[in-house]
Amino acid sequence: MQKKSTQNKDFRTVWSYNCVTFLRVAMQKSKALSELMAIPSRALKDLSARLAARSQVLDEVRSALPAKLAGHVISAGIDQGRLTIGVSGAVWASRLRYLTHGLRKSVGKTMAISILTVRIRVVPPTGPNP
């Protein structure tokens, strides 16, 4: 029995050493987001360009809609001739469907892009659950 006890003791020593090493590596000082964004990276540049394009599309969609409806538009983007709009609820999606023809023309003209279809999605609310 003594030998088994010694083996377990050695195992615990090795395991605790590995955990401490892991914790030291994991607990290094974190970098600020602005510092990470300043690192030159093609992926970040591409992501930043896509974000700017989607933000511009969202602004154009909101400006083409009545104020009450525009407040419920959460996201918008154009991909391969399809304008996709995210709204906060099914009621707003239904109201927006009546305006898609005019919206497609006005946003397409403003952004100089041919929009073939409009897709409306209900976006689930973000934030803490009650």
Image: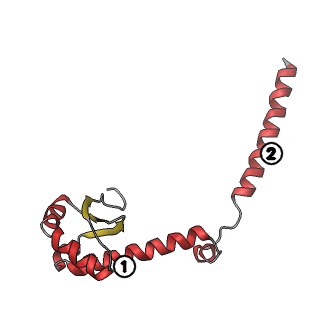
- Figure quadrant of residue 101: bottom left
Q: Looking at the image, which residue is at 20% across and 73% down?
A: 103
Q: Secondary structure at mark 2?
A: helix
Labelled pair 2, 1 in contact (Cβ < 8 Å): no
Counting from the top left corner in percent of width and height, residue 3 is at 87, 21
**Dot 1 corresponds to which residue?**
56
Query: Left of 69 or right of it: where is 37?
Result: right
Give the residue drawn at x 56%, y 73%. 45
Q: Residue 110: horizontal and vertical position, in percent?
A: 28, 82
Within-10-Å neighbours for mark 2: few <14, some 14–19, many 20+: few
**Location of residue 120 by image quarter:** bottom left
User: Circle 2 is placed at which residue position?
Assistant: 17
Quadrant of image for the C terminus:
bottom left
Residue flagged by tag 1: what amino acid is it?
A: Gln
Q: Residue at x 31, y 60 (%)?
A: 125
Task: Find residue 7 and report its image quarter.
Answer: top right
The image shows residue 100 at horizontal and vertical percentages of 18, 68
